[in-house]
Image (spheres, rainbow, N blue to C red):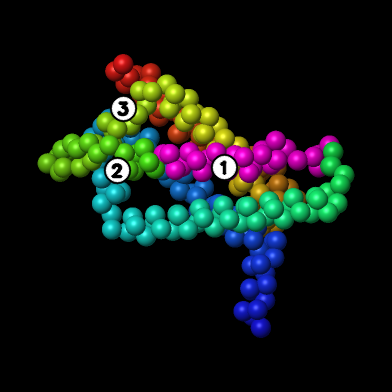
Amino acid sequence: MALSTSHGFLRSTIGRKYLMGLAGLIWAGFVFTHMAGNLLIFLGSDAYNIYSYTLTSNKLLIVAEVGLVLALVLHVCLAISLTMQNKGARTNGGYAVKAKGEKKARFASTTMGIQGSLILAFVILHLATFKFGTHYETTVNGVVMRDLFKLMVEVFQSPGYVAWYLVALVLLAFHLSHGVGSVFQSFGWMNGRYQPVLRKLSAVYAVVVAAGFISQPIYIYLFLNKG
């Protein structure tokens, strides 16, 4: 009976929103830690390469990567499923009258699908560029390791890549701000006096993550550009 109830909940709209939100939160936590770690570029090549080497040489990395991929696939599939369901409801007349005023959907909400698609494309390109890109080597404290700092400097010499990176991060900020707020709402935390605080926290978090990432290519392009 309990299994049947759980299965029914997970197949429901609310259940799918919960799962999509949890998968999104996993990635929200990941992008913050990834951004924070990457800030070590401001301390120089050795500091950044040691950080990268420590991370990539950890035997648990593959487990984390598999978990992130599964969370991403789950998030994307559920987002598509819920979007198609909403479109079906509108087609059947469920949303014949558009809400106005405070109930009118905001820009971030109405473009979540487009944002998500572009961000997914960015993630794929980012992996192809950095994780599977050119392999340079350096030696730090007698240890041979991949020179990811050199690769970053090389990649961010291109104004086109920097521009695309900045656009993707602005989209990520919108996506995170609305997405994290939606998770709070799905969990029932957006009621009462905490709603304004949680919305502000979602926005601040999104801005911090985006600003942290954006500062890196700008710093490299303006101050380390050898072109």
Instruction: Compare marks 2 and 3 and give the one earlier in the sequence.
Output: 2
At label 1, counting other C-alpha atoms closer than 10 Å, the crowd grade (few under 14, some 14-19, many 20 or more) is few
Instruction: State the mark number for residue 117.
Output: 1
Instruction: State the mark number for residue 52.
Output: 2
Mark 1 residue element: helix
Q: CA distance from mark 1 to mark 2?
A: 28 Å
The nearer-to-camera label among 2 and 3 is: 3
Q: CA distance from mark 2 to mark 3?
A: 17 Å
Q: Nearer the viewer, residue 11 or 36?
A: 11
Per the rendered image, the range of residues in magenta is 101-126
Residue 114: image location, x then y, percent: 62, 40
The secondary structure that most of the magenta stretch takes on is helix
**Is 178 contained in the magenta span?**
no
Residue shown at 84% from the left, 42% from the top: 98
Instruction: Compare marks 1 and 2 and give the one earlier in the sequence.
Output: 2
Residue 155 is left or right of residue 142, and the answer is right
Instruction: State the mark number for residue 180.
Output: none
- Quarter residue 33 falls in: top left
Relative to residue 73, is residue 139 depicted above or below?
above
- Quarter residue 78 falls in: bottom right
Q: Which residue, given by chain and number where applicable, does mark 3 sit on?
A: 154
Residue shown at 72% from the left, 55% from the top: 85
Residue 65: image location, x then y, percent: 39, 54
Q: Identity of the amino acid at label 1?
A: Ser
Q: Nearer the viewer, residue 176 or 120?
A: 120
